[in-house]
Image (tube, rainbow, N blue to C red):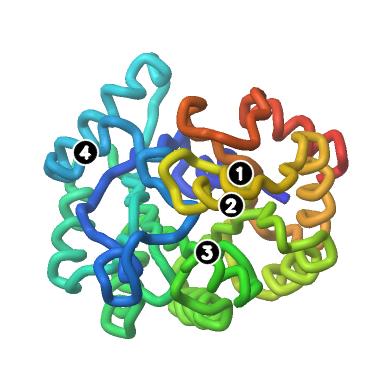
Amino acid sequence: MRDIGSWFRQQLGGRVQKLSVSSGVSCPNRDGSLGTGGCTFCLNQAFTPSYADPSLSITRQLEAGKQFFAKRAASKRVCYLAYFQSYSNTYAPLSELERIYEEALSVSDVAGLVIATRPDCISPALLDYLERLSRRTFLLIEYGIESANDDTLRRIHRGHTFRQSQQAVCLTAERGIRVGGHIILGFPWEDRPELMRQADLIAQLPLTTLKLHQLQIIRGTEMARQYEAAPWPMPTAQEYADLVAEYVGRLPQSLILDRFVSQSPPQMVIAPRWGIKSSEFDKLIQGRGG
């Protein structure tokens, strides 16, 4: 399987840096449409960089992101992808979505968009626009699938079914749009056979990219309150690496793997606290044949 970095370079002809940007949109399970409070595991501050400030314009956020990465990119030609990361970035009127996407693309050296959203926040009209957009710029739509188990999706207050994820991925791919998926591994009630069943289902989807990461217990979330009231065993880094290697072994070789783990600010993480970098974990996976 190809890694995301080399795939980006192949797609865009050089080094690529994603710049997170906050669109200011919400989620249907936060604004009362489906529920309030969001998913039990979710705290956007745990993965949103400081420069992605929704009080700033899209342009100013992207320029701040460039400055944030400027030292790391010194003397290297870099193109950027505007990464609409926090919340559900297709959950707004189409006219507003067009405005923010087009503003991002107007910023110098921004070569395309990565748009994170939910599978129940897509429509034929939006897909029409995204299809046109994908013909003139790089575009990747990332769907938060999280699990293929509907009981899990109910427990974490996700507000959609796995069937909706399947439908959204297929409808998007049918338009010729690159499609990504996001999966969380480690919910305590999902045993290894269930996760391998899930891997087989994910393997059948027309995904371009896939993100995997461990379940993290983040301070301030509903799941943190559940964990502190009745803690459950968390895997070691080695146990998780073994799981990922087996999971990945069931996926098609054409699938581009974006990541295996997520790293939130240490002060926000209750468990697991492995203390290893993402790059170190990638090597751990590769050593297991993943």
Residue sitting at x 72%, y 43%: 234
Task: Determine the image quadrant of residue 205.
Answer: bottom right
Residues at marks 3 and 1, CA–CA distance in whole angstroms:
22 Å
List the residue tagged with mark 3: 156
Chain-order first, disc 4 or disc 3? 4
Residues at marks 2 and 4, CA–CA distance in whole angstroms:
24 Å
| Cβ atoms at labels 1 and 2 below 8 Å apart | yes
Q: Which numbered circle lies on residue 53?
A: 4
Question: Furthest residue to the right?
Answer: 288
Q: Nearer the viewer, mark 2 or mark 4?
A: 4
List the residue tagged with mark 2: 211
Residues at marks 2 and 3, CA–CA distance in whole angstroms:
19 Å
Near-viewer residue (63 or 42): 42
List the residue tagged with mark 1: 259
Near-viewer residue (64 or 135): 64
Chain-order first, disc 2 or disc 4? 4
Residues at marks 4 and 3, CA–CA distance in whole angstroms:
27 Å
* Up/down of 271 relative to 98, above or below: above
Return the x and y of residue 243 as percentages of the image width and height: 80, 49
Q: Nearer the viewer, mark 3 or mark 1?
A: 3
Residue 179 shows up from this direction: no
| Amino acid beneath label 1 | Arg
Q: Nearer the viewer, mark 4 or mark 3?
A: 3
| Amino acid beneath label 2 | Lys
Chain-order first, disc 2 or disc 3? 3
Residue 244 located left or right of residue 70: right
Say what secondary structure mark 1 lies in.
Answer: strand
Say what secondary structure mark 3 lies in.
Answer: loop
* Up/down of 177 relative to 128, above or below: above
Q: Nearer the viewer, mark 1 or mark 4?
A: 4
Residue 144 located left or right of residue 27: right
Label 2, residues with CA under 10 Å away: few <14, some 14-19, many ≥20 = many
